[in-house]
Amino acid sequence: MQGKVEICGVNTSKLKVLKNEETVALLKRTKEGDMAAREELIAGNLRLVLSVIQKFSNRGENVDDLFQVGCIGLIKAIDNFNTDLDVRFSTYGVPMIVGEIRRYLRDNSSMRVSRSMRDTAYKVLQAKEKFMAEHQREPTMEEIAKMLDLKREDVVFAMDAIMDPVSLYEPVYSDGGDAICVMDQVKDSKNTDESWLEQIALKEAISHLSDRERHILSLRFFEGKTQMEVSAEIGISQAQVSRLEKNAIWKIRKSL
């Protein structure tokens, strides 16, 4: 089947997406002890788990493991959600899923380096020692690469792979006050947790729009077409395009 991706035996192309009203109703039934509603609620929010684990896909962890851990976070969010508060479930659920995955990564944080990478690193160290013995100075990366007939990048990656990891909270400077940690020097102020959590929320909000509304927003804001151009392309009046566009934006703002 085209587009079929299985995680933990689940065909992700067929995952159900619940509307907000359905989610609220199922949450209330779950709080009353309806286990069938709880199961339906879990199944209907698996796409939320998928959205979150995509942000951790570059950690080298097994996707199935991350999915299972994310599901644990989802279940905790369902069991602990307060239906009396005027908060969307996803607003509460996403941080719970993220927290569960981070806890898992923290508890399983041993560095894994491939055998080939380790072998390359040991060859680099041997070449470095030989060069220093002959020239009484440290070789450059280019010189080592030439000795081993490797690319400079391969030498750099191999050496980085065997270096002891440093905690982001490792202090690098202190003058008696608050210490400056590694995190303070390497932090990314652009790609923060808040920014990609907002992207997940926006993606979910757009998924609740109708096909026509999504198509109009795509033509207007991704392809840069005017309302007149959109109306000509999809066969409705400019006034209808304007109304549908405003309605779609209103739905997204309300959802966020």
Image: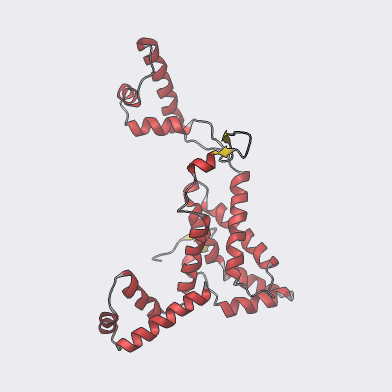
Q: Residue furthest right?
A: 33
- In the rendered picture of this protein, how many numbered marks are placed on residues? 0
Q: Is residue 227 left or right of residue 124?
A: left
| Relative to 77, residue 141 above or below | above
| Relative to 248, residue 6 above or below | above
| Relative to 6, residue 172 above or below | above
Residue at 39%, 18% in the rendered image: 138
Residue 135 sits in which quadrant? top left
Q: Is residue 134 left or right of residue 5?
A: left
Can you give x and y, in whole percent of width and height, for residue 9 in the image? 53, 60
Looking at the picture, tell me which residue is in the foreground, 193 or 109: 193
Looking at the picture, tell me which residue is in the foreground, 58 or 205: 205
Looking at the picture, tell me which residue is in the foreground, 40 or 20: 20
Looking at the picture, tell me which residue is in the foreground, 64 or 77: 77
Residue at 30%, 24% in the rendered image: 146
Q: Residue furthest front?
A: 176
Residue 124 sits in which quadrant? top left
> From the image, which quarter does the N terminus lie in?
bottom left
Q: Is residue 182 left or right of residue 225?
A: right
Residue at 28%, 86% in the rendered image: 235
Can you give x and y, in whole percent of width and height, for residue 50 in the image? 51, 61
Can you give x and y, in whole percent of width and height, for residue 167 in the image? 57, 38
Residue at 33%, 24% in the rendered image: 148
Residue 67 sits in which quadrant? bottom right
Can you give x and y, in whole percent of width and height, for residue 99 in the image? 61, 55
